[in-house]
Image (cartoon, rainbow, N blue to C red):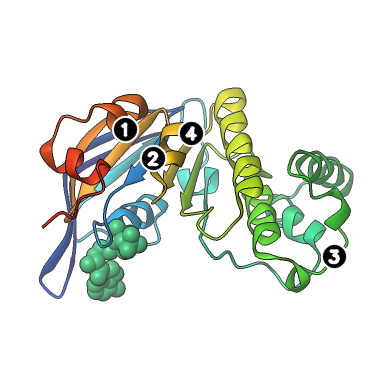
Amino acid sequence: MDIFAADLTKEYEDRMVLNIRELHIKRGALCGIIGPNGAGKSTLLNLIAGLLKPSRGNLFYQQPGNAEPPYQKMTMVFQKPYLLRTTVEKNIAYPLKLRGWNQEDIKKRVAVLADELGLTEFLKKKSWTLSGGEIQKVALARALSFSPGLLLLDEPTANVDPGTTAEIEKMLKKINEEEGTTVIIVTHNLVQARRLCKEVIFMNQGEIIEFTTGEKMLKSPEHPLTQKFIAGELLL
Ligand SMILES: Nc1ncnc2c1ncn2[C@@H]1O[C@H](COP(=O)(O)OP(=O)(O)OP(=O)(O)O)[C@@H](O)[C@H]1O
C-alpha cells in the first residue's frame, strides 16, 4: 500500500505537534521512524492508522487492484498489545473470523503463523498467562493473519529479549519481501533500524528532517540534526 500525506498537521490546544509538508511511503517499503521523545513519531503512525484525525491536511492510500477500503487492509501492533481474554488460537483467528473465513481455512492459517513464530505449543494457552515476548508474537501473528497491505508497529520490541526481537524482525522481513506488505515501524533502537529498515525517516519537533535509505541514515546522514541524533547527542 502506498501512503501519501500533504500539508498534514496535528495540533493540541494550539500546540503544533506534527507538521508534515509532503510524504510518500512507497508500497513495499520497510520503513523505520526514528527520533527523540516527543518528536511526533507515534502521532504520525496513529494518523496513518486512522486512530487520530489530522488538524489539517490529508492522507491518501493506494492499494492497486483492491477495492476494499484501506482500513480493512491495514493493521497496527502496539508496544503493549491488547489480547482478547481467550486462547492464543482464538486471538490469532479473530481477524479471519471477522472476515468470514471458514473454520478449516482459519485453522490452517493459524497453524502456519504459529509455526513461523514459534507459537505452536502455546495455541491452547490463555492469553493472560503469556509472557511479554509471547504476547507480542501473538499480536504480530494476529496482525498478519489476513495478509495486510500495510502493517504499522509502534515500538514492538521495546520490552522483549534479543531472541524474540530477532524472531519478530525475521517475520517482518519475510512478509515485506514475500508478500510485499508495506511495513512502518517506530523504534528507538538504532541498531534495529539499521538491521531491518530499507528506508528510515528521522523526525524532530513534529517535522520530518530526513527521509533516506536505512544504510545512509545510519552511516552518513546529511542533516546536522540527524548527525547529532545518530551520534547520540542531545538535540536542543
Ligand atoms: N492527546 C494529547 N494531548 C496533548 N499533547 C499530546 C497528546 N498526544 C501527544 N501529545 C504531544 O505530542 C508530541 C508528540 O508525541 P508523540 O507521542 O507522537 O511523540 P513520539 O515521538 O512518539 O515520542 P516517544 O518517543 O516519547 O514515544 C509530544 O510532545 C506529546 O506530549
Instruction: Tell me where residue 135 appears, x and y as whole percent.
Output: 67, 61
Of callouts 3 and 2, the N-terminal one: 2
- Mark 3–mark 4 distance (CA, rounded to whole Å): 31 Å
Within the image, what quadrant is residue 63 found in? top left
Could you classify mark 1 by the number of other residues whose Cα lies within 10 Å: few (under 14), some (14-19), or many (20 or more)? some
Task: From this view, report whether residue 26 is shown above or below residue 54.
Answer: above
Instruction: For ligand 1, tell me if the residue under mark 2 lies within 8 Å.
Output: no
Instruction: Tell me where residue 112 appears, x and y as whole percent.
Output: 80, 38
Task: Identify residue type, mark 4.
Answer: Leu
- Dot 3: element: loop
- Dot 1: element: helix
Q: Which is more foreground, mark 3 or mark 4? A: 4
Q: Is residue 208 left or right of residue 173?
A: left
Label annotation for residue 218: 1
Residue located beneath label 3 in the image: 125
Q: Which is more foreground, mark 1 or mark 4? A: 1
Label annotation for residue 196: 4
Could you classify mark 2 by the number of other residues whose Cα lies within 10 Å: few (under 14), some (14-19), or many (20 or more)? many
Residue located beneath label 2 in the image: 32
Instruction: For ligand 1, tell me if the residue under mark 3 lies within 8 Å.
Output: no
Task: Identify residue type, mark 2.
Answer: Gly
Task: From this view, report whether residue 127 is shown above or below residue 199.
Answer: below
